[in-house]
Image (cartoon, rainbow, N blue to C red):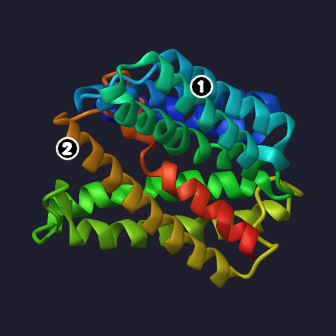
Amino acid sequence: MRRILTALVLAPLALALVFLGPKWLITLATAAVALLAGWEFLGLAERCGAKPPRLAVMAALAALFAGNSQWPDQTLIIFGGLSLSLFACCTFRTPVERVLIDATSSVFALCYVGLTLIAIPTLREQSNGPTLVVFLLLNVWAGDIVALYVGRLWGKRKFAPAISPNKTWAGAIGSVLGSLLVTGGLYWLSLELAQWNFVKLSFADELWWYWLLMAVLVNVAAQVGDLAESALKRSAGVKDSGSLLPGHGGVLDRIDALLLAAPVLWYAQVIR
């Protein structure tokens, strides 16, 4: 029940922000999520023996989003500069025997929760931005929900028992089907809304089969992202990354699928 209530509160807020929020607010909200997730990731790193400079990493994450907002074409250059800055910070602030693990965990935090989530405000700024972000969010959410219930009802054969014992092949297949169903529903809904001149949700710029292909691609990336975060938690010896969201664990637990799905969708749009 706590899981459902948390989702019922957060999901409408996220969708309202996608459709109504200005660029600066969407960037700020995404950056706030990245900072919370980054803080939790650094906690996992500390359980593995690292002691990364938390405040420096938080400042680098904030600077990455600020730089992307002002100079989106220079994002990779900004990321490179911030990564080298974190490396230099670890070189001079930590004992020499711990520089490697502190520096790598700091730079990886910047990449894992920063560079990946930047894809969301970037997608939102495209000509069909609300469509892309709603497509991304609903595919990830639908895949997660369907996988949970299909896995409980029919899941027998384990998918990756060493990483996540609860994941099953039935759940993984159900997740893909859930994404396909929600994509079909979104495509139909956009055609109906077009009759009322609601252009903020429109899939007419691509053929229907393209969106179904994107649904499978995003869903697979989301499942890999979920498993990757599970592997990180297992290596740190914890079940959840935090306890901020009732029923969901930490922020990192809630957005783990987005961390791979968002950049994959963005790269697919760039290639397209």
Q: Which mark is residue 234?
A: 2
Q: Quadrant of residue 212?
A: bottom right
Question: Could you tell me the amino acid type at mark 2?
Answer: Arg
Q: Is residue 81 left or right of residue 34?
A: right
Left or right: residue 15 compared with residue 191: left
Q: Within the image, what quadrant is residue 132 found in?
A: bottom right
Q: In the image, is 199 to the left or to the right of 236?
A: right
Percent coordinates x, y for residue 222 in the rendering: 44, 59
Q: Do tag 1 and tag 2 residues touch (Cβ < 8 Å)?
A: no
- Whether residue 178 sits left or right of residue 16 in the image: it is left
Residue at the disc numbered 1? 32
Under tag 1, what secondary structure?
helix
Which kind of residue does numbered mark 1 sit on? Ala
* First along the sequence among labels 1 and 2: 1
Local crowd size for mark 1, using a 10 Å CA cut-off: few (<14), some (14–19), many (≥20): some
Extreme left residue here? 156
Q: Is residue 83 visible?
A: yes
- At 12% from the left and 72% from the top, the residue drawn is 157
